[in-house]
Amino acid sequence: MSTDLKMIPAAKPLVGDDERAAVDRVLRSGMMAQGPEVAGFEREFSSIVGDRHCIAVNSGTSGLHMSLVALGLKAGDEVIVPSFTFAATANSVALTGATPIFVDIDPRTFNIDPNAIEAAITPRTRAIQPVHLYGQPAAMKEIMDLAARHNLLVVEDACQAHMASLDGTHVGAFGDAGVFSFYPTKNMTSGEGGMITTASDETARMSRLLRNQGMEKRYENEVVGFNTRMTDIHAAIGRVQLTKLAGWTAQRRANAKFLDENLSGVVVPYVAPGAFHVYHQYTIRVVGHDRDAFGEEMTKRGVGNGVYYPIPVHQLPSFGHTFDLPETSSAAREVISIPVHPSLSQGDLETVVSVINSIASAGA
């Protein structure tokens, strides 16, 4: 690759003077641990999750773990999860002592298949943890109906889906709890962090206890807790980013529309009826080609890309199952995510399209 070739990055965190000023404000205040900035961030974030309780923590993974513990998950319980996701989805279940039960996905949306959920329910099943993968809402109507019929909890892994919605209801506002991530490459960031959302006063209070060593009042530890607090520094960044999220989301969707209309030779993302997709990733299927060679050729031509996720979670050494989930396996072989972030120029988008169409037509 030529050293002067411009590389279009697959993702690009957007952090500017507003975020720097917010951090400086906190540093000048002298209050850097969980404080007024965290409270403000929680209050403001509630506006995009149906005014639910919001509990800020130090990562999306912590949020998933804390929410499951707050809901009472324990050893002997089973939680149904997709295998086509980041490992944190299943890790959070295993860390409670419960067992993640891996099921297959809908090949169109890449999200957990409600029919596969129903087939996996046993007397030990306690919860379903759907993932709104790549920013597309999971099939929450069917999932919530299943949960109601079988008296199951629902914890939404919304770590990639800030502002996504289904039939007008935002993700994070369907289940017993929802969790968002603010990792640097997410649609908005706080540097690092997560947010638990819930309509339950009890779950909210328990989550707040768990993140703070089991205390609501200092030295009055009510339960055995963790230290998963968000700092005011991170919350201040998050508050600024939240004000920009709607504009960034509109740009992601506009970029996705351009890609939808101009890519050829690959399978572009399907959007379910009623879904408001926020395109944390714009993920195509490369069918009839060597996916890895396809990605390498894209990189050589200056277009960043990534594979999310090449190994199904149930096959990772940490879980080590050998059973086959055919749609999950196919997706893991065929998907590749391409630039869609709001920093892309029109020229960048045209380059992405030109490169992909050229590789696809050449049979990489």
Image: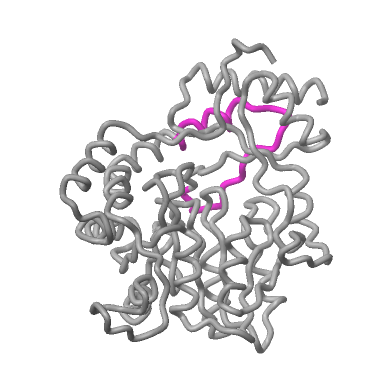
State the image coordinates of residue 62 (x, y, percent, origin top left): 47, 64
Q: Is residue 234 left or right of residue 103?
A: left
Image point (25%, 35%), residue name: 18
State the image coordinates of residue 1 (x, y, percent, origin top left): 69, 15
Q: Which color scheme does this rendered protein use?
A: one colour
Q: Is residue 320 left or right of residue 147?
A: right
Question: Is residue 266 highlighted in magenta?
Answer: yes
State the image coordinates of residue 110 (x, y, percent, origin top left): 65, 53
Q: Is residue 256 visible?
A: no
Quarter of the rendering containing residue 74 = bottom right
Q: Nearer the viewer, residue 271 or 127?
A: 127
State the image coordinates of residue 289 (x, y, percent, origin top left): 82, 33
Please, is residue 217 above or below residue 359 in the view? Answer: below
Image point (61%, 76%), residue name: 79
Image point (66%, 89%), residue name: 123
Image point (54%, 23%), residue name: 349
Quarter of the rendering containing residue 328 = bottom right
Question: Is residue 35 highlighted in magenta?
Answer: no
Range covered by the magenta-colored residues: 252-276
Q: Nearer the viewer, residue 112 or 332?
A: 332
Q: Nearer the viewer, residue 63 or 215?
A: 215
